[in-house]
Amino acid sequence: MQDKKGYMHGAILLLISGCIVKILGALFKIPLTNLIGDRGMGMFSFAMQFFSILFVICAAGIPVAESYLVSESLARGKSNQARRMVCRITMVFTLFSMVLAFGLAIGSDRLSVLFGEPEAGLCLTAIAPAVVLVTMEAGLRGWYQGTGNMEPTSVSQVLEAVGKLLFGLLFARRALEFGWGISGAAAGAVLGVTIGELIAVLYLVWSVRHSIIATLFHREPWVPKTFSRFFSYLFPVTLGAAVMTVSGFLDMALLYRRLPLTGLSTAEVTAQYGAYTGMALTLYHLPQAFSGAVSVSILPAIASAWTKNQQAACRRLAASAVRLTLLVCIPCGAVLSVFAEPLLMLLFSSQPSGIAAACPLLVCLGFCEAVVGLSSVTTAVLQSIGRPDITVSTTAAGCAVKFAVSYYWTAQPEIGILAAPMSTLICFGVILLLNLLAIYTKMKWVPAVIRPALRISLAACMMCASGMHVFRIVMQNNSLLISLVLSAVWMVFLYLLALLLLHALHREDVLMLPGGERLALLLRLP
């Protein structure tokens, strides 16, 4: 139980910071969308897709690989070796990222023309320095995640989001005031993202000044074997992240190339893509803060147990992660699907055309929440037992199916951009099934998914049906905001009650929370 409480403490820290980051991200994107419109958000998202690809190449696999090897080294009492590895990895990959960032900056205009968004060249230039900064972040965060200390990672994420919010909106507004147009405002928002990364890096460098940085001044022998193991773990993790990011990039390319076949103009395609990324995806990503926090926290916990050959502990940790993910992601997805229109109207009231485009997309994305959350957690389980290579294959299979489905459906006039969320659901469904099969093959055990998912889904359906009824009654005499808040309070109460009545809440799940023993006694959980 101690290991579970340890990983849960880290998960709670990351969850809190993740929720703050998602809220700040929404507070950034919502006014930004109202400020620069669908067209500007299309250019902003265009630049962020390039940033995502370079992030995957330079940094995506570093925290996961470092976390695994650091936790393994600490379990064996080799802390100095872990510190040396982290320092050298961070320096090597920072130099590598500088080369790619320079290439993006000098080739920004050509790339924007090549991909059909000629006005987004300045946005690509503004995001180039962030590639270097995010690589440095990844190297430093990997150390802390491996030691199980999630506080620096949590704080740096919040600082990054605050910087992006403040400077991104400020620069975008100033650009419009100076007459630089929508493209200049979008570039200002992108520059705010870069400033946010800089603030996070400065905090992380300050936080490690007495530990890892001191290692740089010690004369220690080069350990080729350690680096060999790091790269053997890094490559599969990076490839897995690359497959998913390239899939998102291809989604963008498909939408820009295939949607015109339905009769839409270039401006209409950019507006729909902006509504999808700036509105629907903004809300869709909020619940994923929880599954992401669980995935990051559970990896070093399971890796340590796996290194010590504690099979029972590995199974308990994996099972609790699956249950907790279902308990949060299923009701969140249900709320997004049922309350898609009022939520969008509340947040994006100045963009009626964007709301009309984003509403069906958000309804569809709501069904993806639980599947995406479970695929993230099962991927972390496979990585924590030293098999990231399997996750590459499962992710590639899911993305291949996604590409095929999206390519065919996008050009169908009756489907159009709906192909993006629909193919996302199919993609992560394939990944989840293959991950569960791989876990069974390697651990001779698979976490229970179907039974708890059915009970939690029933509780979520009861919650949403009653919540919508309350919303319609309250809405007759109150504003949209008050109606949604009162409905949310009622739904939370009803959901917890339904979980107890359906025996979907376990004593083990509650015990991991702060004050869990008293809460379990209060709820009379068996």
Image (tube, rainbow, N blue to C red):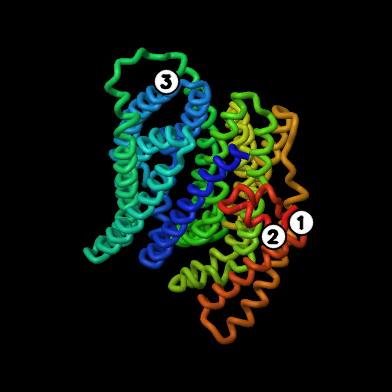
Binning the other alpha carbons within 10 Å of mark 2 as few (below 14), some (14 to 19) or many (20 upward) gives few
Q: Which image quarter: residue 240? A: top right
Residue 425 visible (yes or no): yes
| Earlier residue among tags 1 and 2 | 1
Give the residue at x 63% y 82%. 473
Residue with the mark numbered 3: 81
Binning the other alpha carbons within 10 Å of mark 3 as few (below 14), some (14 to 19) or many (20 upward) gives some
Q: Position of residue 227 (x, y in %)?
A: 44, 19
- For badge 2, the amino acid type reads Leu
Q: Where is residue 357 in the image (x, y as percent from the top left)?
A: 54, 65
Query: Label 3, label 1: how many angstroms apart (C-alpha)?
Result: 47 Å
In the image, 436 versus 317, the foreground residue is 317
Q: In this view, does 356 lie to the left or right of 501?
A: left
Residue with the mark numbered 1: 503
Q: Which image quarter: residue 169? A: bottom left
Binning the other alpha carbons within 10 Å of mark 1 as few (below 14), some (14 to 19) or many (20 upward) gives some
- For badge 1, the amino acid type reads His
Give the residue at x 75% y 52%. 526
- For badge 3, the amino acid type reads Gln
Per the rendering, the mark at residue 523 is 2
The mark closer to the camera, 1 or 2, is 2
Element assignment for label 1: loop
